[in-house]
Image: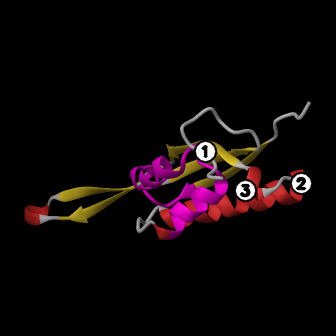
Amino acid sequence: MNSMKEVPAQLNYLRMSPRKVREVARVIRGRPVQAAQEYLKFLSKSGRAPLEKLLKSAVHNAKHNYGLEAEKLFIKELRVDGGPTLKRHMPRAFGRAFPIRKRSSHITLVLSDENPKSKFQIPK
């Protein structure tokens, strides 16, 4: 019996708002890796580049460490959590200070060689 293998990859302390990254993550979650890479190639969102880089890294790890083929991999889990927020202040009118929150993200990606029970299928 073929046991399911999972390949984890993480990107911590990405200096981008989790909201921006989640917009892109929502598009590729649950898809086959090949389809996800195609979607990311043509997406014009700022969260695309770090997710594309993380996905590419996870695929290379799957090939090198586990001997898995990229064509058979699916995105099993893609989670974007908030990281630490850098707090800054901007001077405003009448001597007031306006807070600026520079947010960061932690991204967790898990690839699997088993097709998740979802609406996304590999086209034949």
Q: Mark 1: which secondary structure?
A: loop
Magenta residues span 13-41
Q: Which residue is mark 3?
A: 58
Q: Within the magenta stretch, is there residue 29?
A: yes
Reply above or below: 82 against 51.
Answer: above
Instruction: Identify the amino acid type marked 1.
Output: Gln
Q: Which residue is mark 2?
A: 67
11 and 40: which is toward the camera: 40
Q: Mark 3: which secondary structure?
A: helix
7 and 39: which is toward the camera: 39
In which quadrant is the N terminus drawn? Answer: top right
- Residue contact between numbered discs 3 and 2, judged by CB atoms under 8 Å: no
Q: Within the magenta stretch, is there residue 110?
A: no
Q: Which residue is mark 1?
A: 121
Label 3 vs label 1: CA separation?
Answer: 20 Å
User: For the residue carrying disc 1, how many other residues have a C-alpha within 10 Å: few (<14), some (14-19), or many (20+)?
Assistant: some
User: For the residue carrying disc 3, how many other residues have a C-alpha within 10 Å: few (<14), some (14-19), or many (20+)?
Assistant: many
